[in-house]
Amino acid sequence: MTFDSENFTITPEKQTATSKVLTTPFLTNFLAVYWPRLPDFDYDYNFLIRSSTDGKRWSRWKDLFLMAEGSDSETESYHYSQLIYTRGAKFFQFKIVRVNFSTIHFSDFHFVFINSHNPSPFLAMQREGKGDFKKPIFVTRKEWEASESSAWIHEKPIPLKKISHIFIHHSALDNILPHEVCDDAVRAYQLYHIKTKKWGDIGYHYLICQHGILYEGRKSPGSFAYKEIIGAHAKGFNAHSLGICLIGSYADSSLINQSEKNSLVRKMIEIGELREDEDPYGSSLTPSKEVQNTIIAFLTWKAEQYRLNPQGHSIYQTESEDKTSRMLPNILGYQDVMTTLSPGQHLYKLIPSLRAAVAEKMRN
């Protein structure tokens, strides 16, 4: 869906443009926005979105972050936002803050509305058994009902013949996602990556939901002898790496100060959008112990499988034309190689302790 400047209310003195209410023909549980990546032009704006199920009660305004993950083969013609969870909404508003009205083109903005809801979620939390560091229990593609018929239409899978590094990402999705819709979220990522970004499949090799459950992501078709194939998670660094994404946001909002936070949380509680024990801006910005334990189990499994020193460094030869080599930590955050917030400062600062925990498990 696209629209132009006639669909916005423009307030020049505040440098804001707020769209008219958008109505979708179906219930939407996730949405995203994308717009052209123009040469020599930087959209130095803040983008926000809010949603409503009835057109009367509205969610808070939510930041749209640019997502820097990517396929090595894509042309980078668009900026893409993260997915936003919308609770089955039909009404939306989009706001642009710090607008330069002499340069902006309102018709450039495209909206992606996704309904990935399954009324019978897998509910991975009910699984029994804990697995071990050799291979932790995870939700398989069959269990989260991946769309195998949609995969590998736009590109061919390429085997990962050498794995020297593991990248940690975050998805910048809300941190109050109910567990019963985590399967929906993983399906939404697959749909977004295939149908909008035109990748072969979901870009990440594995994902971890905010409740500490590990999900299988991109998978090799059965005809390949290799267990892993090249992902679409770290542009320029996909050919020799695995990518794991934590579903959630571990970065501070660029727009919320303490007084705004308190006011918004109170309002959300009053209108029933938030329980009193939930805080989308508080301690949830740090991964829970359950999530950290799952990251450690996953990293231990893969470090053992591919003989990686979790606290070591090794040379990564990039896929650039000049074949530039970089010495990088074997386990690293995406911001170590790209100008991006991912995996968020609250997760990024934990990476040294995660490496140490993996090393300790491997020694024992």
Image (spheres, rainbow, N blue to C red):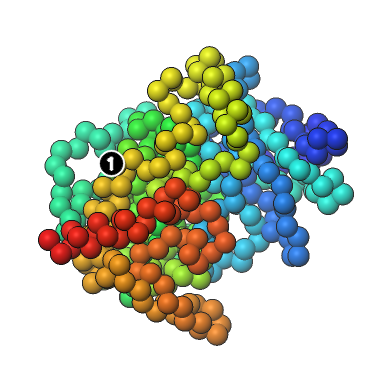
- Image location (x, y in percent) of residue 256: 60, 35
Which residue of the protein is positioned furthest toward the bottom in this rendering?
Answer: 322
The residue shown at (15%, 64%) is 363
Residue 75 placement: quadrant: bottom right
Q: Quadrant of the N terminus?
A: top right
The residue shown at (23%, 53%) is 297
The residue shown at (44%, 68%) is 238
Residue tagged by mark 1? 290
Q: Is residue 285 above or below residue 217?
A: above
- Image location (x, y in percent) of residue 330: 35, 69
Viewer-proximal residue among 64 and 203: 64
Q: In which quarter of the image is the C terminus?
A: bottom left
Does residue 261 appear left or right of residue 327 in this picture?
right
Q: What residue type is labelled 1?
A: Glu
Q: What element carries label 1?
A: helix
Does residue 35 appear left or right of residue 242 in this picture?
right
